[in-house]
Image (spheres, grey):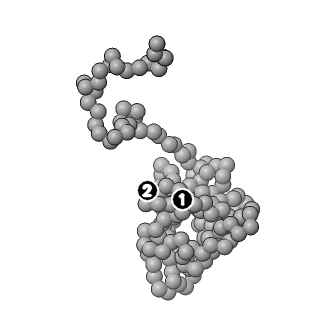
Amino acid sequence: MKFCLRITLESEEDVVREIEINSGILLSDLHYFIIEVFGLDNKELASFYTVDNELELIEEIPLFSFEEHTPSMENIKLNSLLIEKMDKLLYVFDYMKMWRFLVELVAIEKDFIEKKCTFQIGEIPNEAPEIIFSKEKENDFNLFGNEIDESEIDESQINDGAPED
């Protein structure tokens, strides 16, 4: 079987590669092909992460396992993780620079001939994009999910944190 994957760098500019690859390859083979199509240094470590629908990390799959009987890219096949169209993985390359890529299964086809890059947008920047985690506005946070009407707040009942006598 052939998997058509879209690999997108997390960055402000669009940097995307679409590849065709054998669905039965090891994750380590996909890792080396990603390095090739993006022109990255093959001397750095990396990990794939399984994710849920909201892209929350579930499990790390490192390039090498340092413990016996633990998962690594060298012993997990791609088709054991990506099963249906639009399944996703997160790929982190170079732990010091933290290049982050989203890997999406966009199509499954019957005949596989050879691995290749079929589509390319943008060039990879010289430096890994900064990953910015922004928290929601503090006023938007509400434990019960209801909108807060600030006119109903009795400020005389708000404790400033000082111990009460």
Please state the horizontal and vertical placement of residue 132, each as a whole percent of the image. Answer: 51, 43
Mark 1: few, some, or many residues within 10 Å (few <14, many ≥20)?
Answer: few
Q: Residue at x 54, y 76 (%)?
A: 79
- Give coordinates of residue 17: x percent, y percent: 51, 65
Which residue is drawn at the image coordinates 65% and 59% (left, top)? 46
Furthest toward the top, the residue is: 165
Residue sitting at the far front: 165
Q: Secondary structure at mark 2?
A: loop
Q: Nearer the viewer, residue 59 or 114?
A: 59
Percent position (x, y) of residue 157?
34, 19
Q: Is residue 24 above or below residue 147?
A: below
Residue 115's disc number: none
Tell whether 42 sits left or right of 9. right
Which three-letter amino acid code belongs to the residue tagged 1?
Ile
Residue 13 showing in the rendered view: yes
Residue 67 location, quadrant:
bottom right
Q: Would residue 41 be seen by someone viewing this image from the given angle?
A: no
Q: Nearer the viewer, mark 1 or mark 2?
A: 1
Quick one: 50 or 123, which is closer to the camera? Answer: 50
Residue 66 lies left or right of residue 75; in this view the side is right
- Left or right, residue 112 beside residue 64: left
**Rendering coords of residue 24 (x, y %):** 58, 80
The residues bearing labels 1 and 2 have C-alpha atoms spaced at a distance of 11 Å
* Residue shown at 70% from the left, 58% from the top: 44
Residue indicated by mark 2: 54
Q: Residue at x 59, y 53 (%)?
A: 99
Q: Is residue 55 above or below residue 21?
A: above
Residue type at tag 2? Glu
Q: Is label 1 in a helix, a strand or a loop?
A: strand
Circle 2 residues within 10 Å: few <14, some 14–19, many ≥20:
few
Q: Which residue is mark 1?
A: 58
